[in-house]
Image (cartoon, rainbow, N blue to C red):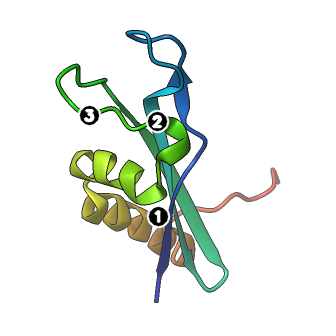
Amino acid sequence: MIEYKWRIDPLMVGTNINGLDNVVVKVTWICEATDGEFQSATSGYVPIELDPDGTFKPYEELTEADIWSWINPHIDKAIVEEGLAAVIEGHKHPQFKYLPTP
């Protein structure tokens, strides 16, 4: 059975955006899949725009749950996991292999 691990990599922040410091502008995510000895991973990012009408939460007060709430609507986790499962299946049952030159 494949186990999936989702995580967020370091956040890219902008300085002095509309007078605010450490404003998150890009979130990089990684999904790692493991099935026994077989592994695969992929990553992506979601750009974040400061909502001038929204409430700004200082970087120091952000939680991982806050970040996931921003990016989850932009990630189709089922599609990502299906793609990783297909890669792992390909590792388990390869259709091609390398042989040395005769």
The reply to whether dot 3 and dot 1 touch (C-beta < 8 Å) is no
Q: Residue at x 81, y 55 (%)?
A: 100
The answer to whether 1 is drawn above or below residue 59 in the figure is: below
18 versus 11 height, above or below: above
- Identify which residue, 71 or 56, lies in the foreground: 56
Q: Position of residue 59 (x, y in %)?
A: 51, 37
Position of 68 with respect to 14 (left or right) is left
| Disc nearer the start of the sequence (1/2) | 2
**Do the CB atoms of the residues marked 3 and 2 lie less than 8 Å apart?**
no
| SS state under label 1 | helix
Q: Quarter of the image holding residue 26?
A: top left
| Front of the two marks 1 and 2 | 2
Work out which residue is located at the far left of the displayed protein and give it.
Answer: 53
Q: Secondary structure at mark 2?
A: loop
Give the residue type at disc 1: Val
Q: Which residue is mark 1?
A: 87
Identity of the amino acid at label 3? Thr
